[in-house]
Image (cartoon, rainbow, N blue to C red):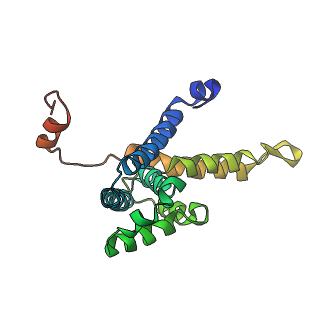
Amino acid sequence: MAPKKSATLTPAYDKSRLLHNHISLWVINQILAREDVVDRGQILSYYVKVAGKCLTPLRNFDGFVAIMYALNDSSIFRLKKTWGRLPPPVRTLWQELKQWTEKGARPLHKLMKEGALPSIPYLGLVGQQFIVAQEYPDFVQNDLVNLKKMRLRGNVVRLVLPCQKTPYIFTPDKRLLVRSIPLPPTM
């Protein structure tokens, strides 16, 4: 839970962070709710595939990391028999996906910076970059503005702004809308 001061100063960020955590906990719960190892293996396999779809083609980096954090949670990672139920192609996919979140997620950060749109950036990395920029002093010698700090902040903004301006183009599937929402679609 975010402190009150943080929630009032950055409500959108806090809501995004809470959604990220909610997704992770939901994935963990979906796997652990199954008593049968075969069922858990199928659910685990499903979420590995969803994580793969989040990474490419959707470029939903925040969703990707939320699922990966869930699958790397100790309560899931220790389920050796469940992991043993993964089909070989899914196991290979898992090994490939893990590489994006290792080493402080540097490979993921590099992919995010490539700028292919539309995409949803991983806000944990965005926040981390702002914190790094904040560590620099506002002014350097002779009361000159610290341009390095300004450039770092600008790089973060340059990463996020195009993501906000570029919508995903999905063709609405009215059958799914009708099935998923009890109200009639408004399209």
Tell me residue 184's x, y (percent).
13, 29
**Identity of the residue furthest to the left in this view:** 175
Q: Considering only vertical position in the picture, is 44 above or below 162? A: below
Q: Residue furthest front?
A: 35
Viewer-side residue, 42 vs 23: 42
Q: Where is residue 44? Give x, y as percent.
A: 36, 58
Residue sitting at 30 percent across and 56 percent down?
Answer: 39
Q: Is residue 78 above or below residue 1?
A: below
Can you say which quadrant of the picture contains the N terminus?
A: top right
In the foreground, 173 or 145 = 173
Where residue 129 sits: x, y (%)? Answer: 63, 51
| Residue 9 as seen in the image, left or right of residue 63 | right
130 left or right of 114? right
Which residue sits at x=51%, y=62%? 108
* Image quarter hosting the C terminus: top left
Q: How many marks?
A: 0
* Residue visible at 45% across and 71% down in the picture: 95
User: Left of 133 or right of it: where is 72?
Assistant: left
Determine the residue positioned at 51% across, 60% down: 78
Could you tell whether 61 is left or right of 37 in the image? right
Q: Nearer the viewer, residue 119 or 65?
A: 65
Picture coordinates of residue 87, whole percent (x, y): 31, 71
Q: Which one is in front, 157 or 102?
A: 102
